[in-house]
Image (tube, grey):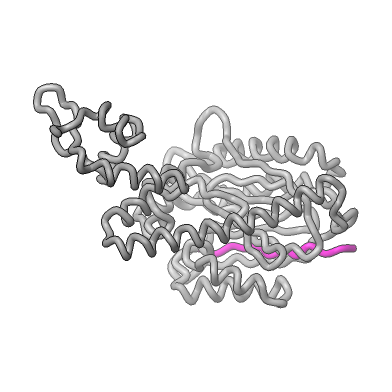
Amino acid sequence: MGLLTIGAFAQAAGLTPKALRLYDELGLLPPAAIDPDSGYRLYDPDQLGQARLIAQLRRIGMPLAEIATVCHSEPVVAAELISSYWRKVTAETAARGRLATFLVDQMSGKGSTMLETIDFRYAVGCDAGTVRETNEDAVYASSRLLAVADGMRGPGGAEASAATIDALKPLELADLPAAELLTVLRDAVAEADRRVRRAATDDHRPISTLTAILRSGAQLALVHIGDTRAYLLRGGELFQLTQDHTYVQSLVGQGKLSCDEAASHKQRTLLVRALGAGGPQIEADLALRTALAGDRYLLCSDGLSAVVNRAALYSTLNTAADPEHTVQQLIELAYAHGGPDNIACVVADVVAV
């Protein structure tokens, strides 16, 4: 049998021509030849096995970057890579299943852990690190508001992060019903964006990230923009509540990079969203959550999350230490990994009152 056109090969493999073009661009499945006149991709029937393997791995949700590693490995190694990936998926699915069960019980009124009255017990830390001469991070915590901001782009960065948090502070004085939390938080973020833009000069155009939690009773409104992060330790499991708004994270989402590759990518700090970055409307992630006694929240800048891995964060947060000691331990961890950036973090425990 001769070479197949991309359409015929796609039909035989159970794929689409669009998928085959993507796999070619990523080096996963290059065509056997390209017609010199038409530029059409031509495939060898012997490539059908590889194409079907890629399709099957995609059906189990494996990212393309990991599929590439599987395809370029010996069969025994490839089998272990697939097994390792599925163990990770199974563990993550189980964790999500437990959380989903809890949420169903809570929303249906079956749960017995819904709190009428809670409070935060909190501590903050903000350190310049070992390399930076100035500190452009800002952090704030009270019984109603937790916030971390990371300013950047020159000497205006510190002013930008401070202005960002200042725009949110008036919210903690208002007696807000839970139904209005997201609305007022969205408006406050728009005001923060305006303040950061006003701090710009001809020489400097600072920007700032923001991750914050606003509380009304047991309801928490979470806002996020940039690469500061929020984590929740609940029931012995650590959940990352935010997704970085970075160029590299967008590649991970598209399956073009693995998480390990993203961690060492030279453009890992390139933001695609930030306050003061321009554009007609600021795009912030907003979510509403319910606090439970025993929860522990961590908000931090990338001076911590970029150098201290998830396992170390979990180990530190899962100790019985109070928020003050936990914050100090987290900063010491960042220093132990070189402390190359400013470090800001707030640890808040949810307690019944």
- Where, by quadrant of the figure, is residue 343 drawn? bottom right
Which residue: 26% across, 32% down? Answer: 9
Looking at the image, residue 207 sits to the left or right of residue 99; the answer is left
Q: Is residue 46 magenta?
A: no
Percent position (x, y) of residue 208? 54, 47
Segment colored magenta:
342-353
Regarding residue 248, the answer to whether it shows in the image is: no
Looking at the image, residue 25 sits to the left or right of residue 278; the answer is left
- For the N terminus, the quadrant is top left
Q: Vertical placement of 11 versus 215: above or below? A: above
Percent position (x, y) of residue 27? 25, 45
Which residue: 48% across, 61% down? Answer: 306
Which residue: 12% across, 28% down? Answer: 35
Between 25 and 328, the one nearer to me in the picture: 25
Q: Vertical placement of 233 versus 283: above or below? A: below
Looking at the image, residue 310 sits to the left or right of residue 263; the answer is right
- For the C terminus, the quadrant is bottom right
Percent position (x, y) of residue 169? 74, 48
